[in-house]
Image (cartoon, rainbow, N blue to C red):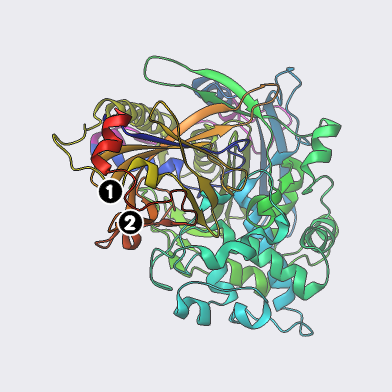
Amino acid sequence: MLATGPVVALMSLAGVAWSASLRAPQDDQAVLKYLSDAVIANTRSPRPVDATRTSLQGSKLLSEEITQHIKDTMALWDIQGLSIAVVRRRSNDSDNFDVETHAFGVKGRDGAPMTTDTLVPIASNSKAFTAAAAGLLVDNNDVPLKWTTKLRDVLDGFELQDPIADAFTCLEDALSHRTGLPRHDALFGYHVDNPMDFSLNIIKDLNPSAEFRDVWQYNNHMFNIAASLVTRLSGTNFTEFLSKNVFDTAGFKSTTFDYRSAIDKGILTEGFWKQGETLNSTGKRYASWPDAETHAGAGGVLSTADDISIWLQVLLNDGKSPVTKKQVLPSQVLAAMTKGRMVASLGLRVPEMGPQVYGMGFISSSYQGHQYVLHGGSLPGYKTQILRFPNDGLGIAVLVNDEKGTYVYDSIMWRLAEDLLQMPTRVDWNERYRTAFRQQLQKNADDDANRLPSPPNAPLPGASLDRISATYSNPAYGTLAFKVKGDGIMRATTPTWNGAASVLSLQHFSGNLFNATLPYNIRAIDEPELIYVETMHLQAEFEIVDGVVKGFGLWGGGLWGAGEGVESGKGSTAREKAEVWFDRNEWPWESEASISPQAAFEIAQ
C-alpha cells in the first residue's frame, strides 16, 4: 500500500551509513522456500556407484572434481575470492587429523591473491567464541555464574521491557535466542559512545515481539550483552579475555578483533557487493570494510582459514587443541553449547535436511542422515560458514569475501561432504540457488511495479503538516526532527539517530497512516558518497488526539526483524502496532488552531 499522493515527509539522517547489519545465518537460504517441488526433485541425482575419485596433487581431501567445482561456482556467482579449511580425523579413536587449507581468487581490488592467512570477518560465527568465553566462566567455580543464572542478578544495567523476561532471562536464554526480543538490527551504526556496552545500554528500550521462551528469534544484542557480562565478571576486557583464553590457548596465529590494524597492515580482505543488480542488469561492484565495534560479541572476530582449521579440530576433539595440546574448552562446556534448546524455523524445505535446533552459538541438524553442527556468518560483503560432522570426524569451513557467499559456501561445503562421506545423493545447490535468486529478483521488480495508490478521496491526517512537523524521539533509536519547507516537503536532519539508515520518507496514504521507505546505504572504499543498496518498505501511523500529535509508530517490512511467523502491526492503535515508537517532544506552534488540516494539505499540493 504505497501511496502516490503529494504529502511527503523526509527524515534525513545526516552522516550515517549502513555499517554492518549482522544477519541470521540462514537469511539468504530462506529464498529456498519459494522453490517448486519440481526444481527440488530435478536438482537431486544418485551419486554414481562407480564414480572414481582423483585426488588433487598433494591433497588427501580435495579431489580434482571438487577443485573444479569450486572454481565453477565462483565463476557462476562472479565471486572475487574465498578460502577454505577441511579437516578429517584419521581414525575413530585418534586425535590426529588430515588438515588442508586452500585459497582461490583475490582479496582486493588491486588483484592481490586471496591466501589461507588472509583475515576474513567471520561475522556471526563469532557467537560460538562468545558462548565459549561465557562457558569458561561457568566452568570456573570462583565465578558466580551458571548457564541458568539470571542476568539481572549478575549484570548491572540489564533490563527488559517484558517483566517476565526481565525477571527470568538467564544466560542460556540470551545465547539461544529465546528472550522474546526480535533483532532490532537497524540500531547498529558506525559511531556510538561506549561501543562495547552499546547493546546493554539500549536493550531496556527495545520492544519485544513475542512472549518469553515462546519463539526462536535471532538477536545479536544478547550476544553483545554476553560479552559485557564476560568483561564484568572476569575483570578483563572481553576481547582480551577471549584472545588469551581461547585464541592463544588454541594456537591461533592471526585471529583478532582489531580490524583497523588489519586494514593498515593489508592482511584483511575487502568485502564485495553489487548495487543495482536486477534481472536485466548485473549491477555495479563496490568494496567496503567491516565495522564491528558495536557488536564484538555478536560478530566481531576476524580469522583465517588456517586458524579456523585449528578451531574445527578443537570442536571435533572435545575441546582440545591439536597444536598446543591444551584443553581450550572443557568438554562439558562444548556439549552445553551444542545441545539444542530451540527449534530454529529457518525456512528450509529440502528433503536432505532434518529439523534445525539452536544451542548456544551452534545449529544442529542432519544432512542425508549425517548429523552436523554449524553456524553461518553474514556482514555486507562477507559470508562464512563453519560446519562439522561430529560422528564422522569431518570439518569444513568456507570464508567468502562477497555478498553472494551464502550460495557459494552451501554449494561447496555440501558437495565436499557428499564426496568425502560418500553420501548417496548429489544435490545441485547452484541450480537451486540460481533459480531461487532469479525468483527473488522478479519478486523485487513486481513489488516495485505494484505499489498501490492512495485511496480516492482519502481522509487527511487529524493535524496539519505544520503540526506534524516537530522533533520525535525513541530512547534507543534516537531523535528525528521534522521541518516543513516551502515546497511542501517535510525534512528532518539529526545527528542523534542511533541506527544505520540514511533517510526515512513518509508518503501519505489515508488518515493518520503513511507509507514509509527506509533506504540503506554502505560506505564504500574510495567513494566520496554513501552508496545506496536497498530499501525497506514500512508503515507509519501518527497518534493524533483532538488535533494534538502525540507521536508516531513504525512497523512492517522487517524493521525489528521478528522471528518466522511472528505477526507485525498487531493491535488497533498506532502505539499498539508500533515496532518502534517515537514520542513527540517539541511543539513548535503557538496556537492549537493556527491552521486547519485541509488548508495545510492544499498548500502542500
Tell me residue 223's x, y (percent): 61, 62
Eyeballing the image, is 431 above or below 390? above
Tell me residue 369's x, y (percent): 42, 55
Q: Which residue is mark 2?
A: 543
Towards the viewer: 253 or 203: 203
User: Disc 1 on helix, strand or loop?
Assistant: loop
Counting other residues with Cα less than 10 Å from the Cα at mark 2, is it few (<14), some (14-19), or many (20 or more)?
A: many
Quadrant where the N terminus lies? top left
Q: Which residue is mark 1?
A: 512
Q: Amino acid at mark 2?
A: Glu
Eyeballing the image, is 256 above or below 280? below
Which secondary structure is most common in the magenta stretch? loop
Q: Quarter of the image holding residue 393?
A: bottom right
The answer to the question of whether label 2 and label 1 lie on touching residues, with beta carbons closer than 8 A, is: yes
Eyeballing the image, is 402 above or below 233? above
Counting other residues with Cα less than 10 Å from the Cα at mark 1, is it few (<14), some (14-19), or many (20 or more)?
A: some
Residue 38 in the figure: left or right of residue 142 = left
Q: Residue at x 84, y 62 (%)?
A: 325
